[in-house]
Image (cartoon, helix red, strand yellow):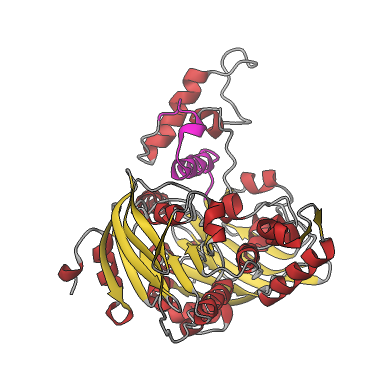
Amino acid sequence: MNNSEHALRMEHVTIEFPGVKALSDVSVSFRKGRVTALMGENGAGKSTLMKILIGLNTKYTGEIYIDGQKVQLNSLQDSRENGISMIHQELNPVPLMTVAENIFMGREISGKLKCFVNFKEQNKKAKALLDSMNISIDPGTRMKDLSVAEMQMIEIIKAVSFDASIIIMDEPTSAITDTEVEELFRIITKLKEQGKTIIYISHKMDEIFRIADDIIVLRDGHFICQEKAEDLTEDQLIAAMVGRTVEDIYPKLECRPGGVYLEVKNATVRNKFENVSFQVRRGEILGIAGLMGAGRTELAEAIFGMVPLDGGEILIEGKKVHIRSEGDAIRRGIALVSEDRKALGLNLNASVKENISIVHLNDYCAGNIFLRLQKERKAAEKIAGEFQVKCPSLDVKVETLSGGNQQKVVLAKWMLGDPELVIFDEPTRGIDVAAKAEIHKMMSEFAAKNKAVIMISSEMPEIIGMSDRAIVLHDGKLTGELKRDEFSQERIMNLAIGRKVEDTK
């Protein structure tokens, strides 16, 4: 292929950190007007490679070519001047400033007097940029009033305003709805038509095969392959990333359902869900599927006592219970692994040990006054070992861990209390394939101990791969229940859009 087709080439890139070769002789290329997915587990080298591109990792060997010209990227400014922009997973806008002010921050459009901003002209130029992408956001809107997806759109517009020709998107759909994903994909298609080069980082397989033209795989700092997306299957991609087959990702143990542990009857929370009824047996994994806004998370929060029921009842082992708080739920043997582990599942500034033991401190107190620190540490060390939490020590802040290991800390925290029912809400969101497999294994082993599991997931392969039964919600209503031998993506999707189960057979 002619090198002129490449917007970017990176050849023989190697970088070492103390004791670690993060990238080893990596050569990759990115074509103009195409989306190239950069795939690999956490630790594969994706972030390191991108940090080289945006000028944050400068002590590398190898060569970088942009439009055939060799460049040296020693700073963020170097990267920007060479047409490279990155939209990070963790967006960081200035919330009280307007859309236009965020777009032109640091390069404000001045009037005749250079010390004053010409807000009228700045808003006009921001609107022109927004219109060029068919984005209907008022440039005078404050950033705090935008959705996460809209903030991402503004970041894309900011990149365009810098005349970026290479745009890196890091997990851009991790916190947005299905409808917003469609809007993002529309914008990406528009950028492709303008000849922009998109580098797309994601763990979501269905997304990759929808939006990517090319796929690059890294593993343990080494280049594995670069192929057209149409030439790869999901099984081949997974094998390239982790050296495992797709069956290894969903290590489902044989289900031997016991008695009903939890029964929900006609549960209702106004404006969230209505008259939802189902059972969960010991020894099984009940999947809850549905589109964003279907009421799945709200249902989980109601069971866990975070929001009160407006109607209906909850029974545990046949007895009606009143769960008015999270504490009530915990005392009754229920745990909730929240979909937002950073905001609701962890204290990022606390240590791994503190995060694991926080819910169970009463178990390590003498006379409910003095904390038995040695007993607490031993318990935390034991459960962290069982869950294979990878960290230098239990005393490091949990924010320093990878997403997969953070999720393991959340699981360890709850499992330390030996619950009878665990509700997993999007348990593998934002983590790599290998970590997914480990968490799936833990989930399956937990159910095999005659415990009950509810798993909420937006990923249909996860629902199909791990559930023994599944219920599907649409707009707050239960549209159907499926046994494992009735599973199919088509049937689940039909139920998720509101069709009844009898219409899907």
Taking depth in this image into account, of 130 and 152 the one nearest to the observer is 152
Q: Would residue 426 be seen by someone viewing this image from the given angle?
A: no
What is the residue that sits farthest to the top in this orientation?
Answer: 113
Residue 65 position within the rendered picture, expressed as x and y whole percent measured from the top left? 63, 60
Q: Residue at x 39, y 55 (%)?
A: 299
Residue 142 position within the rendered picture, expressed as x and y whole percent measured from the top left? 49, 28
What is the residue that sits farthest to the left in this orientation?
Answer: 503
Classified by dominant secondary structure, the portion drawn in magenta counts as helix
* Residue 28, placed above or below residue 159: below
Residue 415 position within the rendered picture, expressed as x and y whole percent measured from the top left? 61, 69
* Residue 259, placed above or below residue 340: below
Residue 32 in the magenta stretch? The answer is: no
Q: Quadrant of the C terminus?
A: bottom left
Taking depth in this image into account, of 16 and 333 the one nearest to the observer is 333
Residue 314: image quadrant is: bottom left
Number of on-image labels? 0
In the displayed structure image, the side of residue 16 where residue 287 appears, left or right: left
* Residue 325, placed above or below residue 144: below
Q: Would residue 480 be seen by someone viewing this image from the given angle?
A: yes
Taking depth in this image into account, of 181 and 117 the one nearest to the observer is 181
Q: Residue at x 63, y 71 (%)?
A: 27
Q: Residue at x 68, y 73 (%)?
A: 221
Q: Residue at x 63, y 44 (%)?
A: 81
Residue 399 position within the rendered picture, expressed as x and y whole percent measured from the top left? 69, 55
Q: Which residues are magenta?
A: 138-165
Residue 146 in the magenta stretch? The answer is: yes
Taking depth in this image into account, of 180 and 440 the one nearest to the observer is 440
